[in-house]
Image (cartoon, rainbow, N blue to C red):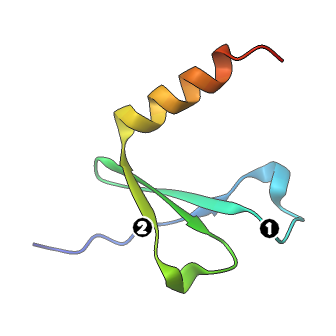
């Protein structure tokens, strides 16, 4: 099994903040990690799970 490198990025809105998360995609997985503790690893979720989360957030009243 080859180990695919994940390229992480921070949200543009948090570019000047020190406390944020980074998100990346490797194949069918979305990975999320703490930008201040990259060595701690990342949480992995299916694309469908992350899409469901974002859809749920969008439906919340503001």
- State the quadrant of the N terminus: bottom left
Q: Nearer the viewer, residue 4 or 30?
A: 30
Q: Residue at the right extreme?
A: 16
User: Which residue in the structure is indicated by mark 2?
Assistant: 6
For the residue pair 18 and 13, the one nearer the viewer reads as 18
Q: Which residue is mark 1?
A: 19
Q: Quadrant of residue 47?
A: top left
Query: Residue at coordinates 16% horizontally, 74% vertically from top-left?
Result: 2
Question: Within the image, what quadrant is residue 49 found in?
Answer: top left
Residue 55 location (% of width, % of height): 55, 22
Say which residue appears at 38% left-offset and 49% top-offset: 45
Residue 25, horizontal then vertical, whole percent: 42, 54
- Above or below residue 50? Residue 29 is below
Judge by depth and name the residue closer to the eye, 62 or 5.
62
Residue 24 in the image, given as x and y percentages of width and height:
49, 57
Asked whether, in this view, residue 14 is left or right of residue 46, the answer is right
User: How far is mark 1 from mark 2, CA to CA?
Assistant: 20 Å
């Amino acid at each position: 099994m080859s180990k695919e490198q994940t390229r992480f990025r921070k949200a543009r809105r948090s570019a000047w903040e020190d406390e944020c998360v980074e998100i990346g995609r490797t194949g069918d997985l979305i990975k999320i990690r703490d930008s201040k503790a990259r060595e701690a690893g990342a949480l992995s979720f299916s694309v469908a799970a992350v899409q469901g989360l974002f859809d749920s957030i969008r439906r919340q009243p503001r």
